[in-house]
Image: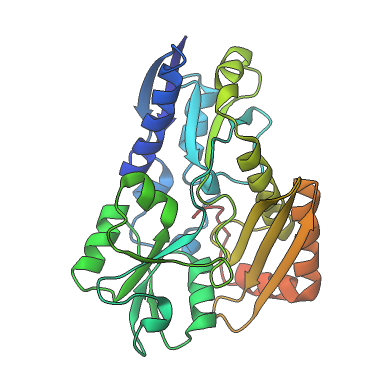
């Protein structure tokens, strides 16, 4: 079967698309990759939390799916808005990479090792809020660009440390500067971090059947739980919300946080359950009732719109 994959053009996005293409070719399919430039790729000089474009890493790719220019899209799951149009479906969530964040530095081993007032780079409000909760003295600066660009800025001494997703560094084989994989108890990852989403058209039965083998039941249960929490809180990856679900026996254990951008308020919820969506929703409700609603209202009020992106 001939299959056309739509992907962003970044080094990591292409690694992900090629990885899925290789698995599909192993099943006997003829696979091509089409690079699609998204709104998020074109806006590189503004912190993502300030942009306010919902689906800015997926909109143009979904348009190509709708127009049948491609048959499937490979996304980082955390880029995908929690609400999909009924025209599309997440056909598969492959086996997940490490969802945690990585502390990268030339000189320092951990966040606690950083000197007073050290310069640290991250484009994520979620990471920034949790950093400020641990170390309010740090100077946190926006950091955009692909993985290579970010690492170059670290090497050149622009930052004392940067925080990146461990999964992307592992996929690209660029873990040399990882000094610490930050424990979930210190920095709760983004919902869906480390997971890929294979999106296709809802009614395209032949493509859905071809992609079925890629779906990993644990990855799907974990990420459905995390995204249910995100949906309940009405946020995306650019609001200070963290969620990490892991298998626990036959069920799941969920760690979740909501934080104020300055890190002065950090609410944490820890729950176990059997139904991924019900567990995520329940944790979201508890966080909202414990003060999360007020925190998020403040965040939404400071942004023209809240994007759903990393």
Q: Is residue 139 visible?
A: yes
Q: Position of residue 259 (x, y in %)?
A: 62, 73
Task: State the residue in front, 20 or 56.
Answer: 20
Indicate whether 123 appears above or below 294. Answer: above
Q: Quadrant of residue 137?
A: bottom left
The residue positioned farthest toward the left in the image shown: 156
Left or right placement of residue 264 versus residue 6 in this view: right
Task: State the residue in front, 212 or 237.
Answer: 212
Indicate whether 247 appears above or below 272. Answer: above
Q: How many numbered marks have been drawn onto this rendered protein structure?
A: 0
Q: Position of residue 16 (x, y in %)?
A: 40, 37
Left or right placement of residue 309 versus residue 45 in this view: right
Indicate whether 305 appears above or below 293. Answer: above
Instruction: Residue at 58%, 64% (x, y): give it.
Output: 239
Instruction: Residue at 63%, 59% (x, y): give it.
Output: 243
Indicate whether 59 appears above or below 282. Answer: above
Task: Specify the color scheme.
Answer: rainbow
Q: Position of residue 160 (x, y in %)?
A: 29, 76
Q: Is residue 55 visible?
A: no
Instruction: Residue at 47%, 9% (x, y): give it.
Output: 1
Instruction: Residue at 73%, 66% (x, y): give it.
Output: 270
Q: Position of residue 303 (x, y in %)?
A: 56, 67
The residue positioned farthest toward the top in the image shown: 1
Task: State the residue in front, 37 or 152.
Answer: 152
């Amino acid at each position: 079967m001939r299959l056309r994959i739509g992907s962003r053009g970044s080094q990591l996005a292409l690694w992900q698309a090629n990885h899925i293409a290789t698995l599909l070719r192993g099943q006997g399919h003829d696979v091509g990759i089409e690079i699609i430039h998204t709104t998020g790729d074109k806006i590189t000089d503004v912190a993502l939390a300030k942009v306010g474009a919902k689906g800015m890493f997926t909109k143009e790719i979904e348009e190509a799916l709708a127009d049948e220019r491609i048959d499937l899209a490979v996304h980082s799951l955390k880029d995908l808005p929690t609400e999909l149009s009924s025209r599309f479906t997440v056909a598969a969530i492959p086996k997940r990479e490490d969802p945690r964040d990585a502390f990268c530095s030339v000189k320092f081993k951990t966040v606690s090792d950083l000197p007073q007032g050290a310069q640290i780079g991250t484009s994520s409000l979620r990471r920034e809020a949790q950093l400020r909760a641990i170390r309010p003295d740090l100077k946190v600066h926006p950091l955009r660009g692909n993985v290579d660009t970010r690492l170059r800025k670290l090497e050149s001494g622009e930052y004392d440390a940067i925080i990146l997703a461990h999964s992307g560094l592992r996929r690209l084989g660029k873990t040399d500067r990882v000094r610490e994989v930050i424990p979930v108890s210190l920095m709760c990852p983004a919902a869906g971090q480390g997971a890929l989403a294979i999106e296709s058209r809802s009614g395209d039965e032949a493509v859905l059947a071809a992609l079925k083998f890629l779906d990993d039941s644990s990855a799907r249960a974990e990420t459905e739980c995390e995204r249910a929490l995100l949906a309940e809180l009405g946020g995306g990856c650019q609001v200070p919300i963290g969620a990490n679900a892991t298998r626990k026996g036959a069920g799941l254990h969920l760690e979740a946080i909501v934080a104020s951008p300055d890190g002065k308020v950090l609410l944490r919820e820890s729950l176990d359950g059997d139904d991924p969506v019900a567990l995520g929703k329940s944790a979201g409700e508890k966080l909202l009732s414990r003060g999360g609603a007020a925190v998020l209202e403040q965040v939404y009020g400071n942004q023209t719109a809240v994007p759903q992106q990393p």
